[in-house]
Amino acid sequence: MIDKSARPMARTSLKWSMIKEDLSIMDTFRLIADLGFDGVELDAPNDLPLDEVLAGRDATGVALPGVINSRHWKYPLTHPDAAVRDACVEATIEALQQAKAYGAETVLLVPGVVDENTSYATAYDRAVEGIDRLLPYADEIGVSLALENVWNNFLLSPLEAAHLIDGFENSRLGWYFDVGNVMRYGRPTDWIEALDKRILRVDIKEFSLAKMNAEGPWKGFDVALSEGDVNWSAVNQALSAIGYSGWVSVEMPAGDRRHLADLKERLDRIVSL
């Protein structure tokens, strides 16, 4: 038997929102288990009945390693309106509490957005302020905040991302590294090297530089997993070099059982490289 814990991509999950089947919560968990995933990540805050989610988790052994903040786009942490920033903090606290109830260890948080209304320097200051407000709750609840760069025009360098995290000197703050997202800005291996032990979770997403250059940035994601320009073997080696051996969550277009089974097969090939 292969020792999965020895791999950098030791345990695999997907996003709940990727599952496009008309199923009960319990049967959705059974589908995830049948496909061979070790876990699933939910958006939070959400209105799913907690008892049904926990029953599905416990009956199938499908873990809930983390949740994704469901409101950080609607209420950016760096918005010019203080009331909007407050709403992001409140939603994140609720997500931390829901994650704790699930037995999850992380909440994914996009730390802000730079746009015509918010300069880069202002976004940085507001992100620091917001994270500083949230960390006492993360400490008290016992769930970590994992920051992610999602084409938000912010924290575009891994050195800058590392600097932000280090400024808090708090082990409850780290990075949710999305392999595909950073292809627009550079090599995933450079980000892994720079972020090092700050990486708490990894998202698996494909990207085509050729399609980006020919058809526009967002078209870069329009490619099947393992058929783009990500050097997955190098990503595995880089993760191994920093001692990462944990969860990876595939984040690709949603679909039915057949589509998800194909994704799992492709993910398994990546994991084994």
Image (spheres, rainbow, N blue to C red):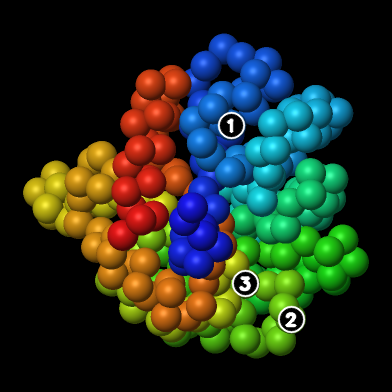
Q: Amino acid at mark 2?
A: Asn
- The residue carrying mark 2 is 170
The x and y percentages for residue 161 are: 51, 77
The x and y percentages for residue 108 are: 62, 56
| Horizontal side of residue 100 vs 32, given as left or right | right
Q: Quadrant of the C terminus?
A: bottom left
Query: How much space separates mark 1 and mark 2, taking CA atoms?
Result: 34 Å
Q: Secondary structure at mark 1?
A: helix
**Dots 1 and 2: beta carbons under 8 Å?**
no
Q: Which mark is residue 33?
A: 1
Query: How much space separates mark 3 and mark 1, taking CA atoms?
Result: 28 Å
The x and y percentages for residue 94 are: 81, 48
| Horizontal side of residue 60 vs 20, given as left or right | right
Query: How much space separates mark 3 and mark 2, taking CA atoms?
Result: 9 Å
Point out the frontmost of discs 1 and 2.
1
In the rendered view, tell whether residue 59 sits above or below residue 180: above
Q: Secondary structure at mark 3?
A: strand
Q: Amino acid at mark 3?
A: Gly
**Dots 3 and 2: beta carbons under 8 Å?**
no
**Dots 3 and 1: beta carbons under 8 Å?**
no
61 and 94: which is toward the camera: 61
Q: Amino acid at mark 1?
A: Ala
Q: Is residue 87 visible?
A: no
Quadrant of residue 135 within the rendered picture? bottom right
The x and y percentages for residue 148 are: 52, 62
Neighbours of disc 3 within 10 Å: few (<14), some (14-19), many (20+) = many
Q: Which mark is residue 174?
A: 3
Quadrant of residue 158 within the rendered picture? bottom left
Q: Earlier in the sequence, mark 1 or mark 2?
A: 1
- The residue located at (84%, 45%) in the rendering is 101
133 and 120: which is toward the camera: 133
